[in-house]
Amino acid sequence: AALAGCARPVDGPGTGELLASDLPPPERFRTPLPIPPVARPVKVTADADHYLVTQRVANVELIPGIKTPIWGYDGVFPGPTFRGRRGRRMVVTVRNELPVPTSTHLHGGVTPAESDGFPTDLILPAGYSPAPPGHHSASGKHHDTTRDYTYPMTQRAATLWYHDHRMDFTGPQVWRGLAGMFLVTDEVEDALPLPRDDRDLPLMICDRSFAADGSLKYPQRDMTHPGADGLFHAGIFGDVVLVNGAPWPRAEVPAVRHRLRLVNGSNARRYRLSFSAGTITQIGSDAGLLTTPLPREDVLLAPGERCDVIADFTGLPAGTEVTVTNTLGEGPTGDVMRFVITGPAADTSSVPSRLSSVETIDRSRAVTERQFDFRFGQGRWTINNQPYDPAASLCAPRLGTVELWRFTSDFHHPVHVHMAHFQVLSRGASGPDPADAGWKDTVDVRPYETVQVLVDFTGHRGRYMLHCHNLEHEDMAMMANFDIV
Ligand code: C2O
Ligand code: CU
């Protein structure tokens, strides 16, 4: 019944079920908007900036006055924001002090396969008994309690994010806090008069539910008998909306332009964000700046997607409340956050009519076409009727080529491709939606809809994956590998 009820409305909250909190909901628009700390390099060498991040248990105050145990990168949620620069290599050492294995994926990163955070390429918990001699992970590296991820940073300026990717456990591990922002900049972006510094706000939106003791509530799952506990794992919706880890926060801002880097870090929930005052102009999507700015009525974000917008509050009188609502939510999940205008201020920023040069890939460049069908079957979520097999690969695109990939679906599935970015060619019978503009790495595939994308396999050779970014679907086998050769 849950299956039939949850996904039919094409513009609904996605595929999932509401998990109700046992804690009374905190007051909306009260908690100040937190900004995650920026990661600082621990070592700068001639050819790279080196960072160290420790995954650990921490007790943090997400809801005012209540302690919540989280699993956080450096013990915070969201994790520290990384700032990378095109042309400058980064090496991020991740140390695991959690009680469980982890794997860290840079979502949207053009990353060599051995640093991509493959789901079976695990960092073991510190203090865990070491793997037996000769035991190797998928990449051939020894299991260890720390891991160096190398990011060449050859890509354009973009709003990326990083999160846990452990096989079968991504949903619960991200839910507990293992996610953060990763911003890449470059000279093209530097030259633009866009809002900067404290007017450039990373906003990670995700829904969570809380148990009576203040802990994050997530269903116990039996992976061998999915659904055996009576919950059909369509996806988990929380009833508290967090922005940068704070429930329905409030930000006091001057009446000027702000750049908002919107990230949907939710496990399963889709949002359609609407602003009660000011104007919204999209300047970037998943993988970087658009060619030209796009005025938007609202912003649709499926799990994993990003949208980079300029919110223009110019001229709004002091005291104006700009409420960001989610028109796909109900009750409390229909609210997201609020900006409160403090008053006028100097503003030298502007939105140039040309942002970057994005070449539109022509369909004729596709050397082959492939279809991937995202569907529920045999008690699991499958791609082309196959549950995930870490040892198998569905296809082998050639490095440097373009392929046309066709995604079909039974329910809402946000489809994410690792390493290779794509452009949306069509959605259903029509062209792309406004939300499909620019270079993408995640696309919102809606029930019984076919989405065609042109995938550019520029970057690195090796084994990568595509999967549904509804994290419960991902954990229930809706993933597949491909090999770039
Ligand atoms: Cu954001 Cu494979 O994931
Ligand atoms: Cu899915």
Image: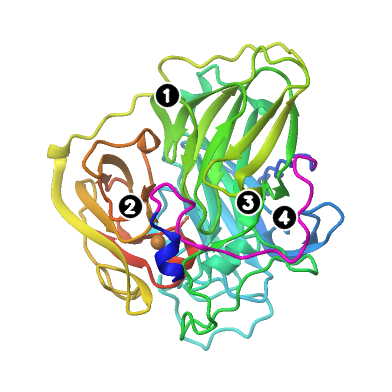
Q: Is residue 409 left or right of residue 412?
A: left
* Circle 4 or circle 1, nearest the eye: 1
Q: Please say whether residue 48 is visible from this viewpoint.
A: no
Q: Earlier in the sequence, mark 4 or mark 2?
A: 4
Q: Within 10 angstroms of label 1, few (less than 14), some, or many (20 or more) residues? A: some
Location of mark 3 (residue):
51
Residue 447 in percent (x, y) is at 33, 55
- Residue at the bottom extreme? 132
Q: Residue at image x 75%, y 39%?
A: 29
- Label 3 or label 1, whichever lies nearer to me, is 1
Q: Which residues are magenta?
A: 9-30
Residue displayed at 68% across by 44% down: 40
478 vs 311, left or right, is left
Name the residue at 77% across, 17% down. 318
Identify residue type, mark 3: Tyr
Residue marked by disc 4: 76
**Residue 233 visible in the snapshot:** yes
- Based on the displayed image, in which of its 4 quarters is residue 433 positioned? top left
Q: Earlier in the sequence, mark 1 or mark 2?
A: 1
Q: Which residue is mark 1?
A: 294
Is 224 in the magenta? no
Q: Is residue 67 above or below residue 336?
A: below
